[in-house]
Amino acid sequence: MKSYLDLVQSVLTEGSWQDNRTGTRTISLPGAMLRFDLQQGFPAVTTKKLAFKTAVGELVGFLRGSRSAAEFRELGCKVWDQNANDNAAWLANPYREGPDDLGPVYGAQWRHWPAYKVLPAENTAQIADAQGRGYRQVTEFIDCNLGPAVLLYKAVDQLRQCLDTIESNPTDRRILFHGWNWAQIEEMALPPCHLLYQFHPSVARREISLSLYIRSNDLGLGTPFNLAEGAALLHLVGRLTGYTPKWFTYFIGDAHIYENHVPMLQEQLTREPHPLPQLLLSDRIPDRAQTGRYEPEWLEQVEPGDFSLVGYQHHAPLTAPMAV
Ligand SMILES: Nc1nc(=O)c2c([nH]1)NC[C@@H]1CN(c3ccc(C(=O)N[C@@H](CCC(=O)O)C(=O)O)cc3)CN21
Ligand SMILES: O=c1ccn([C@H]2C[C@H](O)[C@@H](COP(=O)(O)O)O2)c(=O)[nH]1
């Protein structure tokens, strides 16, 4: 994880101070990339202790489409509590559905992106095509432009569709899922930071890679979690589709360090990184390459305990407050 420390160092030396909505300013640098060969090890930060169980709890919550901090807590992850319950702007938001609600964040979009179509009532070919794709008619109405129209709806399981495409058409260059739903950004406690995930199967090598785009990344707290969760997701998808994880490429829009995280990161810069650990996925998650069977329902069935690190050496724990 020297590349993580190099990024921290370049934000400290080349970044600039900037205010933001939280009231804790940051040193920010626009545009950064980290790239890991997962066959060389799992990208766990070693210059402090990574809260690995918390991070996989968060990932499992996303996989289940959770939108409640209570569900994340039940999975061993408390990092959403403050965003759900301690942010004045969110507490006053009319879309908030009571204590612990986060709105339709991350997993809600990954697994149930709400999709609507308005089609002319007379266009039976379009309506039949939409219904063939799983859209159901909600209502008929008079549209001011179209005249008689039908409204159709379906929830898109983007992640499942990615796995289905890896299975059926692995050379497709469109195997991605997105968290940034413009129609619902205002309904979320926090608009998504990690928002675009694209899978790249290599049929020749039977390997799979992931590109991840993060629009805004808190290098002190968020980055170690986002790296671990992205890599763990790629391992899981590889297991379920029969590909070996290979490249994990991590793109950051706004890479920043909060002012009150500077001492923690400076301490990490004095520490020599340890060799990377390995990720072990439990045997109960079926290996598509061994069984020959495609069992994508495991996306919902995995538990935090199905993920463990082997040979994780790390320096002493360090932490810092989260900006809300
Ligand atoms: N300011 C901010 N930074 C973030 O990274 C962040 C948010 N907000 N809000 C939403 C999510 C939640 N994520 C978080 C939030 C907190 C920790 C954190 O405090 N980590 C501690 C360990 C916490 C524990 O074990 O429960 C750490 O020291 O790594 C990590 C990720 C990433 N996100
Ligand atoms: O997975 C995550 C979630 C959040 N963050 C950080 C990035 C920012 O510091 C804040 C979000 O604030 P915005 O004003 O919406 O950018 O949370 C992260 O690093 N990783």
Image: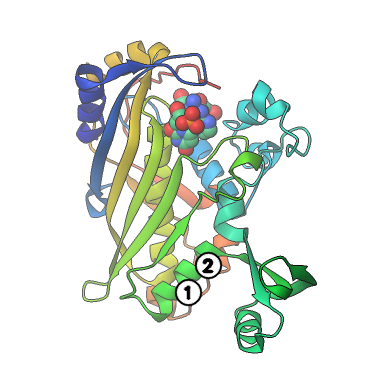
- Residue on which disc 2 sits: 160
Q: Residue at x 48, y 77 (%)?
A: 294
- The number of numbered discs placed on residues in the rendered structure image is 2
Residue 172 or 121: which is nearer the viewer?
A: 121
Residue 89, picture quadrant: top right
In the displayed structure, 221 sits above or below 258; it is below
Percent x, y for residue 92? Answer: 73, 27
Q: Residues within 10 Å of mark 1 (few under 14, many from 20)?
A: some
Residue in the picture at 67% in, 42% down = 103
> Could you say where residue 204 lies in the image, as x and y percent from the top left?
21, 76
Residue toward you, 278 or 120: 120
Looking at the figure, which quarter contains the C terminus?
Answer: top right
Quarter occupied by the N terminus? top left
The residue that mark 1 highlights is 164
Query: Given the image, on which type of amino acid does mark 1 rest?
Result: Asp
Tell me if label 2 and label 1 are in contact, CB under 8 Å. Answer: yes
Q: Can you give x and y, in whole percent of width and height, for residue 63 in the image?
A: 56, 54
- Quadrant of the image occupied by residue 113: bottom right
Q: Is residue 51 visible?
A: no
Residue type beneath disc 2: Arg
Residue 281 in percent (x, y) is at: 44, 55
Residue at the spot 62% in from the left edge and 59% down from the top edge: 112
Left or right, 99 with respect to 171, comes to right
- Label 2, label 1: how many angstroms apart (C-alpha)? 6 Å
Q: Residues within 10 Å of mark 2 (few under 14, many from 20)?
A: some
Give the SS element for disc 2: helix
- Mark number displayed over residue 25: none
Residue at image point 34% right, 74% down: 172
Which type of secondary structure does the marked residue at label 1 adopt? helix
Ligand 2 has an atom within 8 Å of the beta carbon of the residue at disc 2: no
Does any portion of residue 181 appear in the rendered image? yes
